[in-house]
Image (cartoon, rainbow, N blue to C red):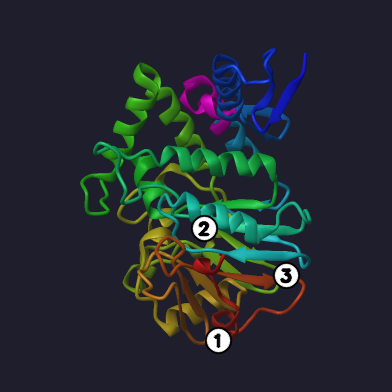
């Protein structure tokens, strides 16, 4: 039987050479069904988009991603340490911005080499709610999938909003308690099984590193302790595993690490000497133009708003000066 080819499939022609409208609708429906069932492969396991509504599949995704982070050969206790080869894309707070995440993954060029890396942090708790609920677990699931798709290349770091979700301690982006809004989204998506997904998410958050350090001495983290809290901070927290007390407010070292602002040159010099690093690349503070430098040691990044920025660095080269990082920054609006 003669047919006409379309992007949705072949449609049979009638005896008079015309397309039957019912056949056309049927082929369009099949094409739409195929589009809705597009698959994404994560480390040998296939997850369909529909599986993001399946609590068992989503919980397994987070659990497997957590195991992968902990087992990484680049992991040294509570940090990631990168070798002197390849490329690192440094990012700032994301806050449930999937468009910017997509741009970041494009810029990271993870497919091009296993020595291409990207750091991600402050992934959840965005400002855009749906029916007064936060569905940023979907963004977190995307990142979990990326850690499996690109093992040892995608490095999620602990941030204060992930820590708040993990501990259940209230936090807000201005629209209410972000932890409760996030849990409301989980309950809407997964019904009575939402606790299962929440527990798996907590495993994933607990597996996140506190920081990433390059061999050239660049430290990437969400933040650092506030200067006035340094007396309560364990400087050796990056050289050991984390304990439950580290996550607790107000003096747990992991808690302090993700909450501090207004870092002083003297504090940064002290940390740089103790940790053998040269440059700190942090988020957590609002940066109007996406990147701000405070020479000689500090770079602040935001990757969530309209003027978001990221910074690529060559891992085989020496640490860039703060001013060099500013000049090499890439506005995500340009991608």
Q: Is residue 293 left or right of residue 228?
A: right
C-alpha distance separating marks 3 and 2: 24 Å
Specify whether residue 61 is painted magenta. Answer: yes
Q: Is residue 89 left or right of residue 269?
A: right
Q: Is residue 243 left or right of residue 256?
A: right
- N-terminal label among 1 and 2: 2
Quarter of the image for residue 90 reads bottom right
| Magenta span main SS | helix
Where is mark 3, residue-wise? 315
- N-terminal label among 1 and 3: 3
Quick check: marks 3 and 2 in contact, CB under 8 Å?
no
Residue 165 pos. (x, y %) = 36, 42
Q: Is residue 116 above or below residue 126?
A: below
The quadrant of the picture occupied by the N terminus is: top right
C-alpha distance separating marks 1 and 3: 17 Å
Q: Residue at horizontal 34%, vertical 56%?
A: 251
Quick check: marks 1 and 3 in contact, CB under 8 Å?
no
Residue 149 pos. (x, y %) = 68, 41
Q: Is residue 210 visible?
A: no
Q: Is residue 218 above or below residue 142?
A: below
C-alpha distance separating marks 1 and 2: 29 Å
Q: Is residue 293 above or below residue 303?
A: below
Where is mark 1, residue-wise? 323
Residue 171 pos. (x, y %) = 27, 49
Where is mark 2, residue-wise? 237
Element at label 1: helix
Residue 138 pos. (x, y %) = 46, 38
Q: Residue at horizontal 56%, vertical 57%?
A: 103
Element at label 3: loop
The segment highlighted magenta reads: 48-62
Q: 261 and 325: which one is in front?
A: 325
């Amino acid at each position: 039987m003669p047919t006409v080819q379309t992007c949705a499939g072949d449609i049979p022609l009638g005896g008079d050479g015309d397309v039957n409208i019912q056949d056309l609708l049927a082929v369009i429906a099949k094409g739409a069904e195929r589009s809705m069932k597009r698959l994404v492969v994560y480390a040998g396991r296939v997850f369909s988009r529909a599986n993001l509504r399946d609590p068992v599949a989503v919980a397994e995704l987070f659990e497997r991603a957590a195991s992968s982070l902990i087992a990484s050969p680049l992991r040294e206790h509570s940090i990631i340490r990168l070798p002197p080869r390849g490329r690192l894309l440094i990012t700032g707070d994301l806050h449930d911005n999937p468009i910017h995440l997509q741009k970041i993954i494009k810029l990271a060029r993870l497919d091009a080499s296993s020595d291409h890396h990207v750091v991600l942090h402050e992934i959840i708790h965005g400002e855009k709610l749906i029916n007064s609920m936060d569905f940023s677990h979907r963004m977190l699931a995307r990142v979990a999938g990326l850690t499996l798709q690109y093992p040892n290349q995608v490095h999620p770091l602990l941030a204060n909003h992930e820590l708040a979700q993990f501990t259940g301690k209230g936090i807000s982006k201005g629209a209410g308690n972000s932890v409760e809004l996030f849990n409301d989204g989980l309950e809407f998506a997964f019904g009575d099984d939402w606790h299962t997904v929440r527990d798996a998410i907590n495993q994933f958050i607990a597996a996140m590193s506190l920081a990433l350090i390059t061999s050239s001495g660049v430290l990437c983290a969400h933040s650092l302790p506030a200067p006035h809290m340094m007396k309560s901070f364990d400087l050796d927290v990056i050289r050991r595993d984390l304990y439950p007390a580290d996550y607790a407010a107000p003096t747990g070292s992991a808690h302090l690490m993700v909450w501090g602002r207004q870092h002083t040159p003297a504090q940064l010099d002290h940390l740089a000497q103790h940790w053998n690093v040269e440059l700190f690349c942090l988020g957590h503070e609002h940066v109007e133009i996406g990147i701000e430098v405070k020479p000689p040691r500090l770079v602040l990044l935001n990757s969530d708003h309209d003027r978001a920025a990221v910074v690529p660095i060559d891992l085989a080269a020496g640490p860039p000066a703060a001013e060099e990082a500013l000049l090499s920054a890439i506005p995500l609006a340009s991608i």
